[in-house]
Amino acid sequence: MENHESGDSHSEGKPGLCNCFLNCVFLSRSQTNLSGGEKKFKSQLKELTVYILFLITLSVVIYGTVTPYQFYYTKSVENLFIDGNNIETTWHDVETWDSLWKYLQNTLVDGIHDNKINEKGIYIYNENKLLSLPRLRQLKISNDSCEIPSVFNNVLFNCYSDYSVDEEDKETLEFFSFYAEQSSDSKVYNEKLNTRPYSGQLARYGHGGYQQLLSTDKNISSYILHDLKFNGWIDRGTRVVFIDFTLYNANINMFCIVKLVAEFLPTGGIATSHEILVQKLLRYVSTKDNVLFGFEVALIVFVVYYIVVECVELMVFRMNYFVQYWNMLDNIIIIKILAGAAISLYRSVTINDLVTKSETDADSFTSFETIAYYESIYNDLAALCLFFSWIKIFKYLKFNKTMRHFSTTLSRCSKDILSFAVMFFIIFFAFAQLGLLLFGTILRDFATFHDSTYTLFRIILGDFDFLALEQASTLLGPVFFITYIFCVFFILLNMFLAIINDTYSEVKSEMNSETRPELEFGDYIKKSLRGLFSICGKKTEEEEEEEEASVDMKEPLPPLKVQPEGVHSDDEDSADS
């Protein structure tokens, strides 16, 4: 510890082996700032080189599982089940009970049974194997979930509120259906159906409900849906219907987890949405995957290295360690990588059991929803980790004068920007609430406070529909729009730019007036390159120019001709004449 703080371990004797190892391997730039000089630049260059290798390894690991085929796989599934040109009833056309049944009996059944059945199961588009049976799941609420006003007691007898877990209807349904009873519990409520709670457009739905499995035979699937429709399986108490199935494409080793959601509004009508996740859940199959595994091991080694570096810095700087925001960014990156490694381990352990279950128990539904959920979290962590890792490059570019201008400007004006942000969001949220109350019942963009805030941000970027505002309110629409543009765009945004411009001007003038240090990092790199070229027997352009200049200086000057007094040269005589 004392050796790190003093930066002069040799003056007090020969250091121990452990201290030498820590100084040579884990000594970071922030610690060598205590000693300064050329040692500091060596540490900067070493740290920058190690970080570039880390960034390359991280990029290979993350991009190794990304392929353009994921996009095309998603589009092909959407064309078949969501909004394809050859679909008579698209998923977006579902707005009533009848249109939902029409979609299920025609579009869904035709899409699932797109190709003939072979001995290995159902294949969609000839290439995508259907894993287990498709499943319909619905959640209902009870008849007494809301109270009818007393003035309507003699007129209205049924009342169904919006969805709530406490108001779920869990009674056994009473109807006879030969084909539906063959495959599933369409009449019995099940508390847990091997799925996760789902956050839809209107509510967050539980993991239970009534489920119905379809068949591997197209005709039987049609009979099942006909029986459910005839017996009123979907009624006024239904609040959501889920359609779940999973596909696997062996050509690109990708799983496609599909979830179609139809939410029933208390006002009548249906709001549809869908979720299609194309993910690579089976890893380490091909040679490329094995190479990627090697990079993953290297990434773990880098993470262990940076963990030790952060621990050493914490011991050296103690509480001052938490003041540096770069240290916080380092910890965020490390935590994200470790969390991603844990999810990757969970995926590797779980996926084989799920695939085996889907093959051995083909007459049931195998849910890949949980593992797909964690894989989505893994992808989000990977994206954020790579983003922050690229942002961290600015930490190593401080030796550049322009980068110092930017970083110093942002740090110096941060308090002013924070004060400005308070004023900005007070006015912004005031307009958001005003828009919600004025146009929320008319315009979709202002239907909720969440939608209203996004709409106002879009207006700042120039994406707005002035005619819709004018049609919603001939007087208040234009007044709202013009007032918002004047206050936010012409005043607040210009204040924001003025804060940054003034601070940048101050920082630039101060840095230009400062004396240049004797040795900067850029000069040290040039010096190191010169030494490297000299070892290799090559000369840099600057060295060649210096040698040429020295040769010119060494060339002898012509001798001076000394003339005796009173004797003039021919040139002088010609000049006098």
Image: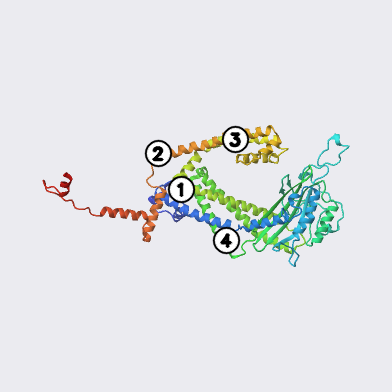
Decide: few, some or many residues near mark 3? Use Cα within 10 Å; few <14, some 14-19, many ≥20: some
Estimate the x, y position of residue 470 in percent, counting from the top left: 68, 36
As drawn, the label of residue 513 is 2
Decide: few, some or many residues near mark 4? Use Cα within 10 Å; few <14, some 14-19, many ≥20: many
Specify the amino acid type for callout 2: Ser
Residue 1 visible in the displayed image: no
Mark 1 to mark 4 CA distance (whole Å): 34 Å
Estimate the x, y position of residue 139 in percent, counting from the top left: 78, 49
- Residue hosting label 3: 488
The residue under the point 50% across, 53% down is 51
**What is the residue that sits farthest to the bottom in this orientation?**
119
482 vs 419, nearest the viewer: 482
**What is the residue that sits farthest to the left in this orientation?**
566
Q: How is the image coloured?
A: rainbow
Specify the amino acid type for callout 3: Val
The residue under the point 40% across, 39% down is 513
433 vs 318, nearest the viewer: 433
Decide: few, some or many residues near mark 2? Use Cα within 10 Å; few <14, some 14-19, many ≥20: few
Disc 2 element: helix
- Residue hosting label 1: 31
- Residue hosting label 4: 292
Of mark 2 and mark 3, the one earlier in the sequence is 3
In this rendering, position of residue 492 left or right of residue 444: left
Of mark 4 and mark 3, the one earlier in the sequence is 4
